[in-house]
Image: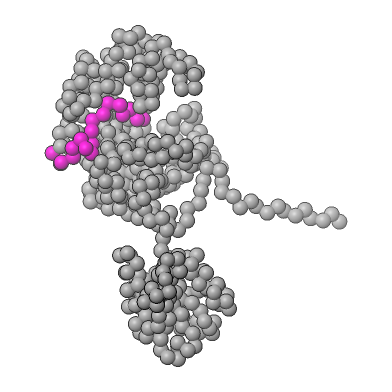
Amino acid sequence: MAKPKKQPRPKAVTPKGFRDYFGAEVTQRTEMLRAIAGVYHRYGFDALESSGVETVEALGKFLPDVDRPNEGVFAWQEDEGDWLALRYDLTAPLARVYAQHRNDLPTPYRRYAMGPVWRNEKPGPGRYRQFYQCDADTVGSASMAADAEICAMLSDTLEAVGIPRGDYVIRVNNRKVLNGVLETMGLADTAQRDAVLRTIDKFDKVGETGVRELLGKGRLDASGAYIDGVGLAAEQAEPVVAFLTSGGSSTAETLDNLRRAVGSSETGARGVDELQQIADLLAAQGYGRDRIVIDPSVVRGLGYYTGPVYEAELTFEITDEKGRPRQFGSVAGGGRYDDLVKRFTGQEVPATGISIGVDRLLAALREKGRLRTAEQGPVVVTVMDRDRMADYQSMVAELRQAGIRAEVYLGNPKNFGNQLKYADRRASPVAIIEGADEKASGVVQIKDLILGAEIAENATLEEWKERPSQFEVKRGDMVVRVREILSGHQQS
């Protein structure tokens, strides 16, 4: 009889493009989401938690560079034939939710949503297939006051999570202005219009000269390869260059430059008027150019947005993997999308919103040293006698009821040194010790692990005597003395 073939053990590896998050990272994200939610709630937005799975039909085809709706997403087919997929953002689900429940929702409907999204794309350094987004949207209002409010709220949010004024700028533009520029150019060929849009999107990388070359015959890139241009004459490309370089020293100057760039286009003129309204509303609330600025170079989501667009950029410098200084860049973006709900209802429903890249924002705060790098662990109650576990559980219950994070050591208590090593690995600030002698005397030993580590590293023998890291207290004073130690470390 043949011997059964042994099944290989599964490999303990994270799937490509995914990662695990531990203790401090999860806590940091939770604290950030709580701070963001506080700002959104203060602005009157309500929380929404929609399904992480949608039908492919409901999600639609909005990811770039894909030919079919279920490319770029994690999708599967149900037995009855329907295709389902993990959501790739939080906006497409909002359109479905509003269309489905619009009769029960207020108009306008103001919601915020936070959670993971999934994209079946090629992963790379810092680019994962699962990441967190944090969105806020207003559905059902065509007023530019809704767009101005989103920008103001984004500014307040960045400051609430620890990005001070001067370290960020929110840039605002309008897709209608860009459409007006394209009308002025008189481009009838769709392929040529798309080529112009792709060139515009490269402005921040190649600058004015590079855009002129790419709109014309072409240019050599940094590697020496020749990139074919769109083939426009210099005078035909001029409106695009005028549009991209319209930024002035004041909002009024920028808007005047944009009006000249759109020429006689009615669409472009409406776009400039909308920017004027947004600027006036923000100024009335005290948001100046030091925080929010009209910037024609912002052209995000060319095929997605129908009006104003905005992007939050962090302006401080960091060092890349090669030691070169560079700006951190964008952490949030959004705009007006008046056609998304129409896919479900057949009627245009105006909407505008913002999406914050939570992981990028956390990375920025780490770069600036504004996040705790390590989370403080729990107070550890050590076990000197395994038959007295009820006494130790009583002690830890008192600590928890006082609001102090605490746990009883649940490993093998035979080696006391291993218990203290465990406390060190848990980053515990305090260990509680109660052996038979302490129990009989009605006292406990309190060991300040943080102070003990500092003394071991830096202090002389005399300082150790003056500041003992372990001392005896009455059992009834345990909670008070532990709280004093924790408070002292928080202030230091």
**Magenta-drawn segment:** 284-301
Which residue is outermost to the bottom?
Answer: 440
Q: Is residue 416 above or below residue 450?
A: below
Q: Looking at the rendering, which quadrant does residue 185 occupy?
A: top left
Horizontal side of 439 relative to 402 (left or right) equals: right
At x 32%, y 13%, the residue is 237
Q: In this view, does 459 lie above or below 40?
A: below
Horizontal side of 58 relative to 151 (left or right) equals: right
Q: Can residue 84 be seen in this view?
A: no
Q: Is residue 121 visible?
A: yes
Q: Looking at the rendering, which quadrant does residue 220 occupy?
A: top left
Q: Which of 130 and 283 is in front in this view?
A: 283
Numbered-mark total: 0
At x 22%, y 21%, the residue is 258
Percent from the top left, x then y, of residue 87? 44, 42
Q: Nearer the viewer, residue 310 or 107?
A: 310
User: Does the magenta segment cover residue 131?
Assistant: no
Percent from the top left, x then y, of residue 150? 25, 40
Percent from the top left, x then y, of residue 459? 41, 69
Q: Quadrant of the N terminus?
A: bottom right
At x 43%, y 81%, the residue is 445
User: Does the magenta segment cover residue 295?
Assistant: yes
The image's colouring method is one colour
Q: Main secondary structure of the magenta part?
A: loop
Percent from the top left, x then y, of residue 386? 54, 82
At x 40%, y 16%, the residue is 214
Q: In which quarter of the image is the C terminus?
A: bottom left
Which residue is outermost to the left?
Answer: 284
